[in-house]
Amino acid sequence: MENNLKIQKVIIASLFLVFLASCNSAINLKKEKEDPLQGVWQLNAFYTLANTDTIVKDYNKVQHKIYLNGYVLWNTDTDINGIDWSGYGTYTFKNDTITETLTSTSKSMKSDVNTYVIPVDFYKDSYKQVNTYYRNDTVFKNIEIFTKID
């Protein structure tokens, strides 16, 4: 009888642990559905298009973005001229669009524009963002593909 009581206690404790683990998984899944950007992202590919011609392809560019609780932090390697590029601020993600408002940037990023509205194609563990800008009669697009690393 004493062995039966021990077995029952072990079974109850095991069931309780399974219940706790499933609750934690449900909470993490809910958070991920609420904000799929949360985490650390690494740039995998960078392209620049001028009108429809690809003028730059770079698979070696190092850039990271961290999205956490409504805040964004990003950096990239110093460019060939020794200039740093980085920024920190807040973000929202709605309707396949990231809106980043940078409140602190490297000197190279200082400008009157501090809010960036970036359309994205979002996948499970990656996304593609396209930044479009115009110079004279040319439409430029910077296309960046990021993969989630954490």
Image (cartoon, grey):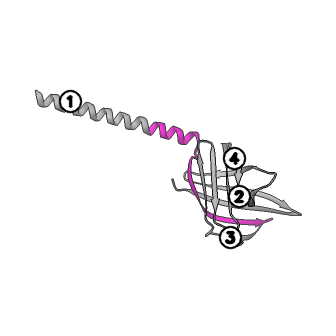
Q: Give the mark, 4 or 1, whose residue is nearer the N terminus.
A: 1
Crowdedness near tag 3: few (<14), some (14–19) or many (≥20) residues, C-alpha within 10 Å:
few
C-alpha separation, residue under disc 1 versus residue under disc 3: 63 Å
Amino acid under disc 1: Gln
Residue interval drawn in magenta: 25-50
Residue drawn at x 82%, y 51% as measured from the top left = 112
Tags 3 and 2 touching, CB below 8 Å: no
Amino acid under disc 4: Thr
Residue at numbered disc 1: 8
Amino acid under disc 2: Ser
Q: Which mark is in front, 3 or 2?
A: 2
Residue at numbered disc 4: 97
* Quadrant in the picture for residue 76: bottom right
Q: Give the mark, 3 or 2, whose residue is nearer the N terminus.
A: 3
C-alpha separation, residue under disc 2 versus residue under disc 4: 24 Å
Let me know if residue 42 is in the magenta part. Answer: yes
Residue at numbered disc 3: 57
Q: Give the mark, 1 or 3, whose residue is nearer the N terminus.
A: 1
Q: Give the mark, 4 or 3, whose residue is nearer the N terminus.
A: 3
Residue 124 spot, x, y in % from top left: 55, 51
Q: Give the mark, 2 or 4, whose residue is nearer the N terminus.
A: 4
Residue drawn at x 69%, y 73% as measured from the top left = 80
C-alpha separation, residue under disc 3 versus residue under disc 2: 24 Å
Crowdedness near tag 2: few (<14), some (14–19) or many (≥20) residues, C-alpha within 10 Å:
few
Residue drawn at x 48%, y 36% as measured from the top left = 27
Residue 77 spot, x, y in % from top left: 63, 66
C-alpha separation, residue under disc 2 versus residue under disc 1: 62 Å
